Image: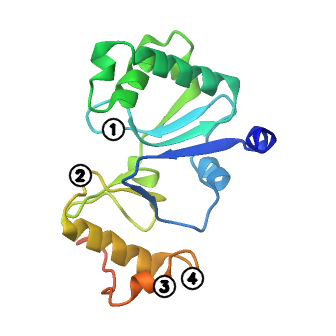
C-alpha cells in the first residue's frame, strides 16, 4: 500500500458534505485547467469571508504537503485552534498567514470557487453550482429537502453503474436551481 501511495501524485480531501459532481475529467485534467504550476502543492478555493475554504483540497503527494499537515495537527494543541468549529481551516489559515514555510507560494487559491468548491444548499434560489462545477459543496445541507435534491441529482447525473440503481427508484427527476444553466 505504501508503494501505491507513493505513486499517486495528487490526493483529494473532501468534507462529508462535498460531492463530486462531474465524472468527465480526472483530477490532473482539472488541475491543468486551473493552470496549477509545479510549485503549487495545495490547491484550494477562495472563501467568502476568509482566505480559503478547506471543504475541498487538492494536495500534491510530496514532503512539503506532509510537513504542512504535521504543522496543522501540531497547531491543534493551541486551544484557539482546537476549539474552533472548523479547526483544520483555522490551522491552515494561521499557517498561510504566518508564511514561515513559503505557504503563499505553495498554496494556490482558486478565485473562481464555483469550479472546484461550489457552495449550494437546499435553497434553489441561491447556489454557485453550475454544470461547469466539479465539486458541489452542500454547506449547511441538513434539511430533508436538501438530501432529496442532491439524491435526485445523483440519480439523474452520474454515469451508469456508479450510483446504485435501486436507490433511484421513485426519485423525481432532478431540475437545476433557478437561474442555473445545466
Rate crowding at label 4 as few (under 14), some (14 to 19) or many (20 or more) other CA atoms within 10 Å: few
Identify the residue at image location x=51%, y=21%: 104
The residue at which mark 3 appears reads as: 165
The residue at which mark 2 appears reads as: 140
Q: Is residue 176 left or right of residue 99?
A: left
Camera-nearest label, 4 or 3: 3
Residue 150 place in picture, x, y as percent: 33, 69
> Is label 4 in contact with label 3 (beta carbons under 8 Å)?
no
The extreme bottom residue here reads 170
Identify the residue at image location x=45%, y=17%: 95
Q: Is residue 181 visible?
A: no
How many angstroms separate mark 2 from mark 3 (CA)?
27 Å
How many angstroms separate mark 2 from mark 4 (CA)?
29 Å
How many angstroms separate mark 1 from mark 3 (CA)?
35 Å
Q: Which mark is residue 160?
A: 4
Q: Earlier in the sequence, mark 4 or mark 1?
A: 1
Q: Is residue 161 left or right of residue 154?
A: right
Is residue 107 positioned above or below 144 on the image?
A: above
Is residue 59 positioned above or below 90 on the image?
A: below
Image quadrant of residue 161?
Answer: bottom right
How many angstroms separate mark 4 from mark 1 (CA)?
33 Å
Q: Secondary structure at mark 3?
A: helix
Amino acid at each position: 500500500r505504501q508503494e501505491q501511495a507513493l505513486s499517486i501524485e495528487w490526493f483529494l480531501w473532501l468534507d462529508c458534505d462535498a460531492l463530486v459532481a462531474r465524472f468527465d475529467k480526472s483530477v490532473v485534467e482539472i488541475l491543468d485547467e486551473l493552470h496549477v504550476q509545479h510549485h503549487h502543492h495545495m490547491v484550494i478555493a477562495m472563501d467568502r469571508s476568509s482566505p480559503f475554504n478547506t471543504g475541498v483540497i487538492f494536495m500534491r503527494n510530496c514532503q512539503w504537503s506532509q510537513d504542512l499537515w504535521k504543522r496543522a495537527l501540531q497547531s491543534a494543541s493551541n486551544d484557539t485552534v482546537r476549539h474552533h468549529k472548523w479547526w483544520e481551516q483555522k490551522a491552515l489559515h494561521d499557517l498561510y498567514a504566518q508564511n514561515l514555510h513559503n505557504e503563499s507560494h505553495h498554496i494556490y487559491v482558486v478565485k473562481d470557487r464555483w469550479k472546484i468548491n461550489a457552495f449550494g444548499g437546499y435553497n434553489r434560489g441561491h447556489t454557485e453550482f453550475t454544470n461547469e462545477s466539479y465539486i458541489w459543496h452542500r454547506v449547511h445541507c441538513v434539511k430533508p429537502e436538501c438530501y432529496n435534491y442532491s439524491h435526485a441529482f445523483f440519480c439523474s447525473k452520474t454515469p451508469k453503474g456508479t450510483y446504485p440503481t435501486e436507490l433511484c427508484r421513485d426519485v423525481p427527476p432532478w431540475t437545476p436551481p433557478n437561474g442555473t444553466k445545466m
